[in-house]
Image (spheres, rainbow, N blue to C red):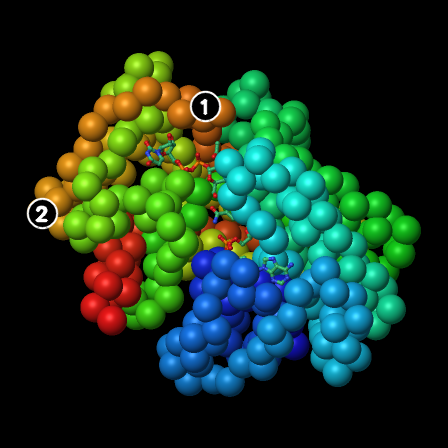
Amino acid sequence: MKVLLTGGLGYIGSHTAVELLDDGYEVEIVDNLSNSKEETKGKIEQITGKKVVFYKEDLCNIEKLDEIFKKGKYDAIIHFAGLKAVGESVEQPLRYYETNLLSTINLLKCMRKYDVKKLIFSSSACVYSMDNELPFKETGKLSPLNPYGRTKLFIEEIIKDECFARGDLSAIILRYFNPIGAHKSGLIGEDPNGIPNNLMPYITRVALGKLDHLNIFGHDYHTKDGTCIRDYIHVVDLARGHKLALDKIKDLKGCEVYNLGTGTGYSVLDVVNTFNSICGDKVRYEFAPRREGDSECNYADASKAKNGLNFKTKYSLKDMCESAYNYEKNNTKK
Ligand code: NAD
Ligand code: UD1
């Protein structure tokens, strides 16, 4: 089976490429490198011992995308490409709507023209309304809090409409919870530009002395230790979820939505304490005011993916922290 990964040199795409290549899939990647590096292609090849075809192109350029599809003859597409920084999306909503929606529409046009019938899309837990009862179920109310989240919700709807209109297009929408961690090789992982917004890359940089201390946003939530609760999932488990989705989509008609999470919530302090037990208490932290837009607690109902995709997570919070630390150390040596 030949699969095109859009945004396949990014954090989740690169881990998925490794899992698929290890499993015998033929993988091609299109990425404009706006948030990734070309050297990741070599690292994917080094880990797997397999070759990857790579196109440095922007999905917003439909002529270039058309050329890729003309050559490709893909059996399926996994669509990771997109802008994903929540704060930036509030400041630059039009850039987010234009990039995320146009790239998806161009992709769907090419899939229609070249008769590609299988699509897996990276959505997010941020499409859920925070008023939903816990754990979040796929049938829950949808109400994203920011433009980034709204691009995810709009794309979900566009994909459903296109499945209905075509009749022969099947799609799986995966709503990721909080992916963290890295491949055990330490060659690929999460490497955001500038000061990280997300918890784990901030922690690893404090541990390596690149940042002074972690600010824990809020210590007065109604949780066991006053800090927010999230469903952290090892990125390699998440990547395996895409392989299971490809198995499922072979016989799927229409569009299905699945949460990808562990179903377990951990607090910010759980993550910091677990990390500190591994690195020897290098992560200094201070309590800071709540971050605007944060929800107190969210985690997945993981039963639909378990029953429908046979998805079970393998890795613990300790594994997530160890692999993230290992990657940051490796990444710092160079
Ligand atoms: P990432 O930024 O590491 O990867 C996205 C990749 O897409 C990057 O390599 C970037 O260069 C590329 N890209 C962006 N716009 C492009 C365009 N117009 N044309 C071609 N390539 C383009 O992000 P990630 O963490 O790997 O996330 C992958 C997907 O999963 C994204 O759609 C993201 O919104 C979604 N998601 C991520 C998380 C998370 O916590 N990381 C959570 C939920 C959903
Ligand atoms: C955020 C986004 C979400 C996106 C996800 C992955 C918001 C409101 N949500 O989720 O839409 O899908 O990233 O990109 O931005 N924390 C600290 N100190 C820090 C960083 C984070 O205490 O320096 C806390 C946060 O308050 C939160 C938890 O750590 O409780 C996790 O934060 P983060 O990694 O940013 O993920 P989310 O906020 O869950």
Under circle 1, the secondary element is loop
Residue found at the very far left of the displayed protein: 280
The structure residue drawn at horizontal position 22% and vertical position 51%, both measured from the top left corner, is: 210
Give me the disc on residue 292. Answer: 1
Q: Secondary structure at mark 2?
A: loop
Q: Is residue 106 left or right of residue 210?
A: right
Query: In which quadrant is the N terminus drawn?
Result: bottom right
Q: Identify the residue shown where x is 20% and y is 38%.
A: 213
Q: Is residue 160 left or right of residue 326?
A: right
Q: Residue at x 72, y 76 (%)?
A: 68
Q: Amino acid at mark 2?
A: Gly
Q: Horizontally, is 317 left or right of 285 in the view?
A: right
Q: In this orientation, which residue lies closer to the viewer: 311 or 159?
A: 159
Q: Which residue is mark 2?
A: 280
Image vertical order of residue 104 relative to residue 18, above or below: above
Q: Is residue 146 above or below residue 188?
A: above
Which residue shows up at 35% across the image and 14% down it? 222
Mark positioned earlier in the residue sequence (1 or 2): 2
How far across and how far down the image is residue 220, in percent?
31, 15
Q: Where on the picture, by quarter, is residue 62? A: bottom right
Quarter assignment of residue 39? bottom left
Q: CA distance from mark 1 to mark 2?
A: 31 Å
